[in-house]
Amino acid sequence: MSNSLLHSAPWEKFIEMDKSFTFFQNALKDAFAGSFAAAFDKVQDWTSMQSLIVVSAIDEHYDVLMSHEELKNVMNLEELHQQVLQKCAN
Amino acid sequence: MAFIRANNVKIRGISAAIPRNEESNEDLTDMSKESIDLLIKTTGIQSRRIAPSSLTAADMCQSAAEKLLLELQWDPSEIDVLIFVTQTPDQPIPGSSMQLQDRLGLSKSCMAMDLNQGCAGYVYGLSTIMSLMSSSQLKKGLLLVGDTITHLLDPLDQSTVPIFSDAGTATALEFDPNATEAIFNLQTDGSGADAIQQLRGEPMKMNGHQVFHFGLKEVVPNIRQTLEETGFELDSIDHFIFHQANKLLNESIRKKLNIPSEKVPYTLNIYGNTSCATIPLTIVQSLNNELSNTSKTCLLSGFGVGLSWGSGVVNLSDCVLPNLIEL
């Protein structure tokens, strides 16, 4: 992420961001570096450590913080992606 | 904003002591190989140093202080102020700083006090002792910072045992009219006190998600504010010494601030999270070849139990860093 992006206003970041589900999926897959294939799509099966990795990846790529409670209430990756975009827009 | 400026005080040396007893996260029982691999990859912690019950934080700090005084050729009677930062004193009453004054052979005219602080303890302690010395022109001071957090853990708790480790450190400070100003930015949020907590008669517990969320939310703005207040550009800081919490959190902070990885040393892979001692321990372990004859501007950032967090910009030049002591 460039310095200019870090210091830009939130709506500017949102406009510049890749909002596609594919980008989201790949960002999370990269964070796990291939060590998380089996239960990747089942959010509620994630272990505590796996959840932390996801929280960190979302923060890094979207500058959005997801709480543990928010993650627990999400059923699948698509739903999580939608929540992240919604938080970005706010 | 609790910005603290301390003039005319120089850090002359830092030393650290760790227990000889080493435990590897590879050897954790009750966890699958897959879980252990993910744990090591995520936390970055491969091994930890565990103090036997007979070895206290005060013992390790005393050894670190004795070695530092010897290398600096300081007479213990010259010390005007001693601050001991710990959450694991030898006993509740009296504070261990008073006993350390005696054990180190410091004079009766030396003031001594304990400061109960955790992961932000080094930054809090350093700002406190530097402010005291600066405002009252105290000549020489000792900041002792250490914990035996592993003595507080439930041995079956998989959220704390693989993380925490023990260490004690000593930092020597001297009044010097030519010293570069140090600036600190300290913050607190007691509403998150239950994130890391030890209630009477119970082991210490940690809500990893709460701590992680707090770290991601608060540390980066705190560091940015500190840089703005000091007028330093990110590029002009030689080293960023972060509290060694866990690699995932520390790397997130580093990436958000766009700091090159070579400026952020790590020791948590070999020493784990030693609570308040991580910052001085990391300086001793990682910068001992760099600080003998050069001047380095370092940003220190501590964050955790409390919730409490803070950062400071300090100059480290001609700083004595004796080899790590194993006890």
Image (cartoon, coloured by chain):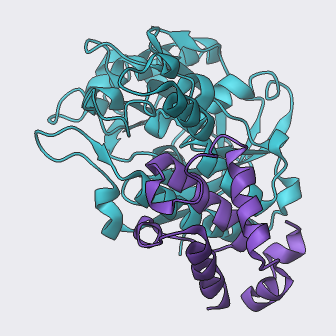
In the picture shown, does residue B148 fall above or below B105? below
How many numbered discs sit on the rendered protein? Answer: 0
Colour of chain B as rendered: cyan
In the picture shown, does residue B62 fall above or below B235? above
Asked whether B166 or B155 is in front, the reply is B155
Q: Residue at x 71, y 43 (%)?
A: A34
Q: Position of residue B221 (x, y in %)?
A: 64, 70
Answer whether residue B75 is visible to the viewer in this image.
no
Asked whether A63 or B53 is in front, the reply is A63
- In screen coordinates, is A64 left or right of A52? right
- In screen coordinates, is B11 left or right of B274? right
Q: Position of residue B93 (x, y in %)?
A: 14, 35
Q: Residue at x 15, y 40 (%)?
A: B202
> Which quadrant of the view contains residue B104?
top left
> Which quadrant of the view contains residue B160?
top left
Asked whether B22 or A39 is in front, the reply is A39
Q: Position of residue B318 (x, y in %)?
A: 78, 29
Report the residue that reaches farthest toward the left: B201
In the picture shown, does residue B101 fall above or below B52? below
Q: Position of residue B92 (x, y in %)?
A: 16, 36
In the picture shown, does residue B113 fall above or below A84? above
Quarter of the figure that contains the C terminus of chain B: top left
Q: Residue at x 45, y 38 (%)?
A: B275
Answer whether residue B253 is visible to the viewer in this image.
yes
Tell me the purple chain: A
Asked whether B216 or A66 is in front, the reply is A66
Q: Residue at x 39, y 60 (%)?
A: B307
